[in-house]
Image (cartoon, rainbow, N blue to C red):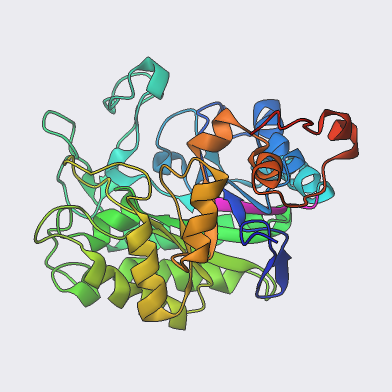
């Protein structure tokens, strides 16, 4: 059997294969509410037999949304539709995950197909943004408001309350988004954190917020649920956050009960990133080797053979599929054919099983 389609036990769960659908924003919500687009989008990945499907960045507060089209979990009314989605994922044998997020200074943005730029706080669909320091992401943007201690406490509470709602909705995995230049990354990276209080300056101070949020989210979870954290392993800029910092952080996160590190990079400042197949895999491999934690890798992983090789090389434990899943929602079924491995097709689709090497 291939590694990609073999099972793996994490905590009390057994994932039926190593394929995880990475969180991908759909920018299709209204006031944070999920709708049938999200049901069909996520549900189709479950009929495609991914082991775990993680819902897009879901804001813990209205001001934490990347855009006005983001999903949210800041009020109880959001739960009903999300539970319907979770129930369908479970009915297809997939685990359901949710990524809890706060965009910080990268919030109040337009939808990508409308340009994706910042919407000023006094414009339609815009709002005031918050960050570690009052430093804009790009020149010419409206700078964020620096979070004071009350604001920081509110963010911690917002994550905890969203986690409680995620428990009610039935998610198996909660992932904390601490990557891609969003709020938690803004605190731990010296590029964006210019504070002089206990949340700024030293490494220990800059990671304080992410640790407090991990603890608060963990306290809201059941013993069975799994906790993932997505980090940016490097800022790709000399003198900024780097892989050595990430390893130090992950060792602490492992002690705090985090099960998996979803390993990404960049996003906190515009810079040249060598984006090519497997460009982020070495970071997942180094974190895995030096901390012993389970890691997932993501980024331009486009073929079953490529994913299989990563696992064979013991560079990661889980393969997170993003854009390739948009092109092929049934990527695990495709992988079974390509790797000459067995995977159970939905009975409704069995008559389409490829013959005569139609997929090879």
**Residue 32 appears in the figure:** no
In magenta segment, residue 190: no
**Residue 23 appears in the figure:** yes
User: Residue 200, position in %: x, y?
Assistant: 17, 67
The residue drawn where x is 18% and y is 32% is: 142
Q: Quadrant of residue 35?
A: top right
Question: What is the number of callouts on the image?
Answer: 0
In the rendered structure, which segment of residues is drawn in magenta? 93-99
Q: Nearer the viewer, residue 337 or 160?
A: 337
Q: Quadrant of residue 161?
A: bottom right
The residue drawn where x is 31% and y is 52% is: 265
The residue drawn where x is 46% and y is 69% is: 214
In magenta segment, residue 96: yes
Name the magenta segment's main secondary structure: strand
Q: Nearer the viewer, residue 91 or 144?
A: 91
Work out which quarter of the rendered image holds the N terminus and state it: bottom right
User: Residue 48, position in %: x, y?
Assistant: 72, 40
Work out which quarter of the rendered image holds the C terminus and state it: top right
Decide if residue 42 is on the left or right side of residue 66: right
Of all residues shown, which one is farthest toward the bottom? 255
Decide if residue 126 is on the left or right side of residue 43: left
Q: Nearer the viewer, residue 98 or 62?
A: 98
């Amino acid at each position: 059997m291939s590694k990609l389609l073999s099972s793996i036990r994490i905590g009390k769960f057994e994932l039926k294969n190593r394929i995880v659908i990475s969180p991908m924003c759909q920018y299709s919500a209204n006031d944070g509410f999920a709708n049938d687009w999200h049901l069909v989008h996520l549900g189709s990945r479950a009929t495609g037999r991914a082991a775990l499907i993680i819902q897009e960045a879901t804001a813990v507060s209205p001001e934490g949304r990347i855009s006005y089209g983001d999903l949210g979990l800041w009020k109880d009314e959001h739960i009903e539709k999300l539970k319907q989605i979770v129930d369908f994922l479970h009915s297809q044998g997939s685990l359901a995950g949710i990524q809890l997020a706060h965009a910080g200074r990268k919030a109040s943005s337009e939808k990508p197909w409308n340009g994706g730029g910042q919407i000023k706080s006094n414009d339609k669909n815009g709002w005031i943004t918050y960050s570690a320091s009052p430093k804009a992401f790009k020149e010419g943007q409206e700078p964020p408001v620096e979070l004071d201690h009350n604001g920081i406490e509110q963010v911690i509470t917002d994550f905890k309350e969203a986690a409680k709602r995620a428990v009610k909705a039935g998610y198996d995995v909660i992932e904390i988004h601490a990557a891609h230049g969003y709020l938690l990354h803004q605190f731990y990276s010296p590029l964006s954190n210019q504070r002089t209080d206990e949340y700024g300056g030293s490494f220990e101070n800059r990671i304080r917020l992410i640790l407090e949020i991990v603890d608060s989210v963990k306290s809201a979870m059941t013993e069975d649920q799994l906790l993932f954290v997505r980090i940016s392993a490097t800022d790709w800029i000399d003198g900024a956050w780097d892989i050595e910092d990430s390893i130090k952080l992950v060792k602490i996160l492992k002690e705090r009960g985090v099960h998996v590190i979803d390993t990404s990079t960049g996003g906190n400042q515009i810079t040249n990133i060598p984006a090519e197949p497997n460009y982020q895999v070495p970071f997942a491999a180094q974190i895995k080797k030096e901390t012993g934690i389970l890691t997932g890798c993501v980024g331009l992983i486009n073929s079953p053979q490529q994913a299989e090789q990563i696992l064979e090389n013991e560079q990661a434990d889980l393969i997170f599929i993003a854009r390739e899943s948009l092109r092929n929602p049934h990527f695990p079924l495709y992988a079974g054919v390509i790797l000459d491995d067995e995977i159970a097709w939905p009975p409704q689709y069995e008559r389409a099983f490829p013959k005569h090497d139609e997929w090879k």
